[in-house]
Image: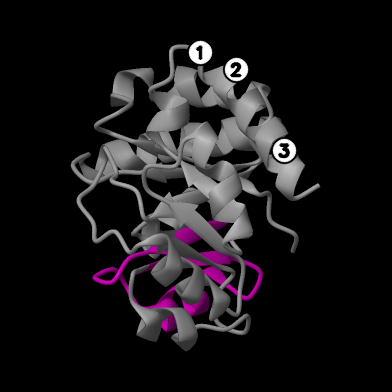
Amino acid sequence: MNLPRLYAISDEEIVPNEELLEKVEEVLVAGVKLFQVRFKKTPHEEQYRLGKKLRELTRAHDALFIFNDSPEVARSVQADGVHLGANDPRVSFARRLLGQKAIIGVSCYDRIDRVVKWGPQEISHLGMATPYPSPTKPKVNPDIEEFTNLVSHARVPAYAIGGVTLERVGEMLKAGCYGVAVVSAVFAAEDPARAVLEFSEEIKKYAP
């Protein structure tokens, strides 16, 4: 599967749940084809309710839908896959539950052991901690040389995540990233749809 290079991720701190569906539809209309919802504080029942609605929206716009952390909820809302962090359910469990065609992403942070561990038989893509500070979560920030070295060891498509702005897209793709994952740069933008279009055009300069 050829994954889209622009990866949009919502976050409760950026997009309150009562605004989520409207904001997501706005970026889908603008052309987002890979979307992940991130819930950290939302009750399970609310995650399921919103997840079902998001599944309907993403299908209507022919976009892939990834659920964060929970393979169980991902399966229950018929998401296309799940993204897992260090403390989330194991990849092997997610693969058994969701099937061979599911998209499974893994956060690698700045850890080379996690980067080299995963290949295309197990997962679909990696999330790589950028050299930039993130407004949505605390993280270690490798310098650009360390980051480039980490990406060079990836055996699956690597997405830069954390503090990615329009001006930083080129640096991330030149470092070897397949694409960029954006949270606040899209969802906290004054005009999210315009931000999507600008990111898409910038990506095309380096990854036509």
Tell me how far mark 3 sits from mark 2, CA to CA: 19 Å
The residue identified by callout 3 is: 62
In the image: residue 74, left or right of residue 200: left
What amino acid is found at the position of numbered circle 2 in the picture? Answer: Arg
What amino acid is found at the position of numbered circle 3 in the picture? Answer: Asp
Tell me how far mark 3 sits from mark 1, CA to CA: 22 Å
The residue identified by callout 1 is: 191
Q: Position of residue 109 (x, y in %)?
A: 34, 66
The residue identified by callout 2 is: 194
Instruction: State the extent of the magenta-drawn residues as a range.
Output: 80-108
Kindly indicate the quadrant of the structure image that contains residue 27: top right
Q: Is residue 10 above or below residue 86?
A: above
Under circle 1, the secondary element is loop
Under circle 3, the secondary element is loop
Who is closer to the viewer here, 80 or 188? Answer: 188
In the image: residue 107, left or right of residue 30: left
Q: Is residue 163 above or below residue 174?
A: above
Choose mark 3 or mark 1, whichever is in front: 1
2 and 1 marks in contact (CB < 8 Å): yes
Q: How many residues crowd around disc 1 within 10 Å: few (fewer than 14), some, or many (20 or more)? A: few
Q: Position of residue 182 (x, y in %)?
A: 47, 40
